[in-house]
Image (spheres, grey):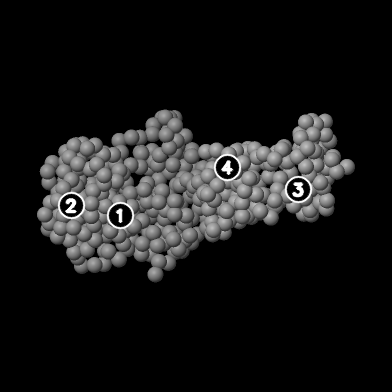
Amino acid sequence: MTYKMILVAFIVTALGCSKPATEINKAVPFTSQQNVKADQQQIQAPLNNQENEQKLTAHIIEFKKGDTLTHLLRRFGFNAKDAILVKRALGDTFTLSKFSVGQRIKVMTLNNTIHSFTFSTAFNQHARLIKHNQNWQVDITQPQLASRYQQKRIVITTSLFLASQRAKLPTDIINQTITALSHLIDFQRQIKAGDTLTLYYKQMYLESDAQLSHHHTPPRELLYAALSGVTNNIEITRFKNAQEQQAFYLPDGRLAQSFLMKTPLNGARLSSTFGKRKHPVLGYTRLHKGLDFGAPIGTPIMAAGDGTIQSANWAGSFGNRIIIRHGQNYQTLYAHLKGFAKGMKKGVKVQQGQIIGYLGNTGLSQARHLHYEVHKNGKAINPLKLKQPSQSQLRGKQLALFNQHRTYLAQQLTQHHNTEIQIASAR
Ligand SMILES: [Zn+2]
């Protein structure tokens, strides 16, 4: 009887359909000798879940600060030798010292002796280690992913970032939104109190053993964003084009990207109080031929568009300054930088969004900020007036599919209309 019970426990676990038991079986001698026999005869063995459930017990263990695997599993008979064998079995898959605080592992025991344990090595990758003939074998699985859709509507009071935080928007969704909208709006000047932002996004989750991955950020994808307010009414929808590339599109099917980005730094880091200061001068005027963005020292500055570095050097009152030459006789200028990104020098090609330097307070500058200018044919122009929509446009069948997709999204948004509205009050 004892022998058969071990047999069943072993097989069911190997098939991965064991369920946590509520009760520990009283006394089952467990030797490697019996295990070998069980292994050899498992094909003929009857499956009996009922019996198995009384044998394997699931324990969820969480890593606290200073814990090691050996320390946590010691009470189940796991020792230093096991740790060495587990390390060997895992190879490059996972380093045992890389368990993070708060990470959970699922331990299956047989008569309070370790039988196997499972943990996540990535959000959707689990490693299961099974003790087998005094040795350890690893089984890597990709658990099933499912997606959940969420709609959030926030009313911006002072700063988009603060409003998003108060509305408990995931940081990666805020960043995806800001990156996408940086092409189209100036986050320092064109976001006003009372503007509303509606977001629709997808969040992945695991259908089973989700708690093993709870310390990882689940993958999320922004699907739709609409900003409506006094100065802006912008709607962007993610869509996969005929070349299987995902991008955001405007309602008329134009690619929601511009030749030069309106906000050449992370809009999330802009100081909301910056606009209320007297100096440095804000907004484009005859005397001040650029736009100022206030953000913490060291905030990465991005190339507003594809181009070639014309100069990256000290330039008197501008402090550390970069000038980029773009197509169509456009140039952009970035001043008061703390420093340049590695490799930035005359003649180097840069891509839109690439980090070129870091925000500072060098030269004749009264506060930490980025001074940004756009020149056309050698003359400074008002970047806010710049209209450079993308030439790329969905047409024909692609446009029809896109419109269908937008209609579908609109239905989804209406359905959830009253459920997730959040009014974020930022001070
Ligand atoms: Zn300025």
Quadrant where the N terminus is found in the figure: top right
Above/below status of 180 relative to 275 = above
* Viewer-side residue, 181 vs 350: 350
| Coordinates of residue 249 in the picture (x, y in percent) | 39, 41
Tell me the tag on residue 299: 1
Residue 378 falls in which quadrant of the image? top left
Q: Residue furthest right?
A: 1
Q: Which residue is mark 4?
A: 87
3 or 4: mark nearer the eye: 4
Quadrant where the C terminus is found in the figure: bottom left
The residue type indicated by label 1 comes to Thr
Residue pictured at 29% horizontal, 46% vertical: 355
Q: Is mark 2 within 8 Å of ligand 1?
A: no
Above/below status of 39 relative to 319 = above
Residue pictured at 22% horizontal, 37% vertical: 348
Distance Cα–Cα, label 3 vs label 2: 67 Å
Q: Is residue 406 visible?
A: yes
The residue type indicated by label 2 comes to Asn
3 or 1: mark nearer the eye: 3
Q: Which residue is mark 2?
A: 320
Q: Is mark 1 within 8 Å of ligand 1?
A: no
Assess whether mark 4 and mark 3 are in contact (beta carbons under 8 angstroms).
no
Q: Earlier in the sequence, mark 1 or mark 2?
A: 1
Distance Cα–Cα, label 3 vs label 1: 54 Å
